[in-house]
Image (cartoon, rainbow, N blue to C red):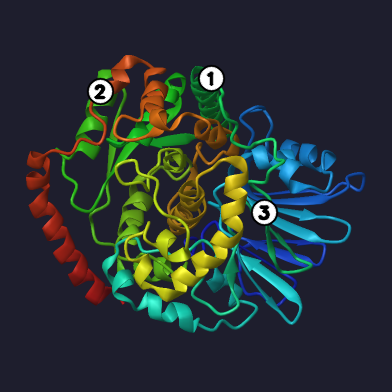
Amino acid sequence: MNPFRYRRQFLLTPSRNVDLPGWTTLDIADYRLHAHPDLAVSVHDDEASPVRLLLLGFAIDPARPGLDDAALLAELAATWRGDVSTWSAVELAGRFVLVVFTADDVLFLADPCGLRTLEYTRRDGALHLASQALLLEQVVPLRPSARYRDLLESRYWRNSQEAFLPADATPFEDVDRLVPNHLLRASTGEQERYWPVQDTALHARQGADPAFLIESAITRLRASLAAAADRFPVALPVTGGLDSRMLLAASGPLADRLFYYTLRYRHLHRRSPDIAIPSRLLAARGLEHHIIDCREPATAEWLRVYRDNSAISHLDDWGQIAYGMERGFPAERVALKGNAAEIAQFYLRTDGILPDTDTGRQLARLIPGWETAPAIVASLDVWREKAAPAAAAVGIDLDVLFHWEHLCGSWQAQSQLEWDIAQEAFTPFNDRVLLTTLLQLPDELRSAPERVAFRQIIASGGDDWLKEPINPRTSGLRVQEFLPRAAYRVKRKLRSRSVL
């Protein structure tokens, strides 16, 4: 088998007619699991427990960092009461799909931001599930969706380096994707929202002391990083950005166990802030900084495998970067990523103004180009119908939940799915407890340009972490980077004509 083909992916199906040589197989209930050997798989199957559990990937409980996946599953099975919204599983961080086999149904749910993807189809009464739709072709035929065929051929898709679909969508007829904060029932084939709901213990409380909330967030973040470092060898990507800096500061006690690195890709050069700032920050503390060069064109064979690992593969951008990572990133380590923190930072707001979110079209305007795609607008109309009252009931603005479920649950999830070919990743902010703690902070402490609360998280690791600017943008820098950016765009267009 080619070890990079469908790396860290899975197929869960009632069918026994599957051709995936070298993969781990496991029969549980009416399903057979096929898992790539680099994907962690854990099972709790105890006759004394009310449920059987299957974990694909890994889970971390920052409140109990000493528990491994097996211990977590045993605790979850013992505390199952039939209601996912109040189950301790919703407090887990990690990157996983969790399958719950009850006496009369099978439930599927994922980590808080859905970073371990799950796509599925129901054919002739049987439910088939996989990391992504192309694996479903092992057991059922796939037919491209007419609605999304137009989108994939659209100007938006051609011109966007990182184009993506709404969280529930795939390019195929009758194939759906599990949306974050939802569970899928095998008995109905339908998704149900389990968070946020009005009676959940994790709702966004009003009036809590900001200092207490910030300290709680710092404690949770440090515990999450320490738990990950105890579980795996870890690596920390460092850039000139805010979220990277928070992880850098919070992981200070783990410095002797971390591999610090920065990816050099696209137009970046040695003086680019995303390379120069990490170098200065790490040098000031005597820490080694590894720069992984991702600019060398990937081989045709690599690009073919990368393309075939996902129906929506960002071949000539993320694929080129992944090629550099596979060659320069230490394979035994898990990358600690700062994504998902933006959920609490009003990332989608212009000048701090609450956007209009009364229709699917208004929501689509939050992502440049989406408004011109009728299929996306229609999908967001459906999503909004149930998301809006759920968000309002607990005091979360709809643009925040949109960011959580569509940017993190689709754009970032797709990125991690594609980069599974080169690395496993853990995202400490992919944690419902941590995110809801941050969402309770007053808007003015989370808003641009200062984002005061997040700078306080950085300062908790030492004021020297703030000596370098965060995401500096100057006219001189823009001029300096113009030619490298233009040259990159030309090379990208030329490569895209020759790759396939």
Give the left or right position of residue 225, taking residue 73 as reference. Answer: left
Position of residue 197 relative to residue 246, above or below, is: below
Residue 444 at what x, y percent from top left?
39, 30
Query: Mark 3 Cα within 10 Å, few/some/many (few <14, many 20+)?
Result: many
Give the x, y percent position of residue 462: 36, 15
**Is 103 situated left or right of 193 in this image?**
right
Numbered tag placed on residue 109 in the rendering: 3
Q: For marks 1 and 3, give the CA distance.
A: 32 Å
44 or 86, which lies in front?
A: 86
| Amino acid on which disc 2 is placed | Ala
- Mark number for residue 283? 2
Mark earlier in primary sequence (3, 2)? 3
Of the numbered discs 2 and 1, the one sitting upstream in the chain is 1
The residue pinned by badge 1 equals: 209
Using the numbered discs, state the Cα–Cα distance from disc 3 to disc 2 in whole angstroms. 42 Å
Disc 1 element: loop
389 shown above or below 225: below
Residue 72 in which image quadrant: top right
Q: Secondary structure at mark 2?
A: helix
Q: What kind of residue is marked 3?
A: Leu
Q: CA distance from mark 2 to mark 1?
A: 36 Å
Instruction: Tell me the SS state at disc 3.
Output: strand
Q: Nearer the viewer, mark 1 or mark 3?
A: 1
- The answer to whether one can see residue 260 in this image is no
Mark 2 neighbour density, 10 Å: few (under 14) some (14–19) many (20 or more): few
